[in-house]
Amino acid sequence: MSRSLPARSRAVAALAVGGALLIGGLAGLAPPRATASSHREAPLISGEPQYDNTDVYAFVSPDKPDTTTLIANFIPFEEPAGGPNFYKFAADARYDINIDNDGDSQTDLTYRFEFQHHYKNRGTFLYNTGPVRSLDDPNLNFTQTYDLTLIHRAHGTAQSARTLIDDAPVAPSNVGQASMPDYRTLRTQAVKPLPQGGQVFAGQAEDPFFLDLRVFDLLYGGNLKEVGNDTLRGYNVNTIALQVPSKTLAPTQPIIGVFSDVQRRTAAGGYTQVSRLGNPLVNEVVIPLADKDRFNASIPWNDAWFANYVTRPELPKLIQKIYKIPAPAEPRNDLTQVFLTGVPKLNQPPGVRPAELMRLNTSIPPAKSPKRLGVLDGDNAGYPNGRRLTDDVVDISLQVVEGELLGKKNDLGDGVNANDAAFDRAFPYVASPNSGSAVSKAGVRVRPGAYNDLPDVKTGRHFPAMPAAATGLGAAAVIGGGSMWLRRRRQSRS
């Protein structure tokens, strides 16, 4: 397996904007119509955030390179002070992380999380009745536990199931300093070992996705002065995370395909899939409204149904209309390897059937100095070879949709190059959740306990703010001119 690609191959490996989807020659595989990542990306799921899968990550663990880490996030835009009920996983749902380890686009392994609710005192409205210092503290009124089951499948059909852990505790919502004076301890207690090696975590975390979501205001409406604002700064998500020996996931060859789904219990007692996510941005900016709910209910085997949306994507046409940047010619056959088959000699499994899966070559070691543009910048351990928390998938997507793979070099981006919170160096890697004690001031969430001097925008008086928040203010880029997010090209694009 080659671990270093020439420049042209690196370009082919770059992320395409969207594209869950199949290109020419697969029309005969189109499935029948389905029945009823992304934050609020589809009409039905936008009204049911507990079941909404926002992002999936898959990467070789940087501190344990013989293991692979899998992360799936849910419940977008969690306001940290959102009491009195705060945020919980649904008890009537199955949260799955699925693995295809032979390239046939059918699931071979499913790690299934099922959650239960517990109350100590239903005679109060409080989430906690006093300071909480451990996950079994009697002051923690509402708690969740979960069972984790490993399902082995053949051709997608379950053959056996084994409980890996039961009644494991969920890290609670970070209510605030008075309620949870040492949240770090609670988070640590929620990391549990797995039999035969590995670890698991479920609980709240800071939302690791970084981007400027005002892109949905008609691509900034032709006005780029507000580019550079990390819209998700200060919000939390609910996270499930697994760290598993890579040989367990990929016993015969090193490349896996990953996606997550959520199945909700029906009135008849069965389950129906309501959310699905592999690569980022697919259902948000590639699938049109007419098929968003269909995509969430589908499985990778049926992805030929959505083929036309990647070969004739909408986004470059919008960019051309608003910013006068010519859209590359169609059909866009340059966008297939990243999302459907994997890239030859990088993360394409033998005998691959094209499908929208996040493909990861578990034999490629972690980069000592990860680059935010991943494979596009010569870092083969990054996106689209899996997805790390630090990979800048928005900038990669914009550059590719405007023709990076076709030789139209550009440095397009949204001006948000990194997450506002530092990631952990050990499992589960996601940053601890923002505290409910934090307040928003001048568009910046201020965490108590770490101080800097920032002026109140209305009174001119000063108030305490953490240094990172002050830095966040300075990160908002003011960009003018007629080209979209076009930055001066630098020698190093990391």
Image (cartoon, grey):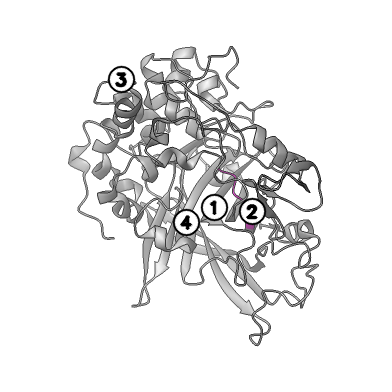
Q: Earlier in the sequence, mark 4 or mark 1?
A: 1
Distance in Å between CA atoms under marks 4 and 1: 23 Å
**Is 451 left or right of 212, judged from the image as shown?**
right
Q: Please tell me how crowded label 3 is: few (under 14), some (14-19), or many (20+) other residues with Cα within 10 Å.
A: few
Distance in Å between CA atoms under marks 4 and 3: 48 Å
Residue 320 falls in image quadrant: top left
Based on the picture, tell me whether residue 208 belongs to the magenta stretch.
yes
Distance in Å between CA atoms under marks 4 and 2: 29 Å
Mark 1 lies on residue: 73
- Relative to residue 149, is residue 24 depicted above or below? above
What residue appears at the point 51 percent right and 72 percent down from the top-left corner? 91
Per the rendered image, the range of residues in magenta is: 204-209
Foreground residue among 248 and 378:
378
- Relative to residue 290, is residue 318 depicted above or below? above
Mark 4 lies on residue: 152
Q: Please tell me how crowded label 2 is: few (under 14), some (14-19), or many (20+) other residues with Cα within 10 Å.
A: many
- Which label belongs to residue 205? 2
Q: Earlier in the sequence, mark 4 or mark 3?
A: 4
Q: Is residue 450 visible?
A: yes
Q: Where does the C terminus fall, quadrant-wise?
A: top right
- Which label belongs to residue 250? none
Q: Please tell me how crowded label 1 is: few (under 14), some (14-19), or many (20+) other residues with Cα within 10 Å.
A: many
Q: Please, what secondary structure does the residue beneath circle 1 have?
A: strand
Give the amino acid type for the residue marked by disc 4 in the picture: His
- Please state the horizontal and vertical placement of residue 214, each as a whole percent of the image: 46, 40
Identity of the residue furthest to the bottom in this view: 123
Q: Are circles 3 and 2 on residues that touch, CB within 8 Å?
A: no
What residue appears at the point 58 percent right and 39 percent down from the top-left corner? 59
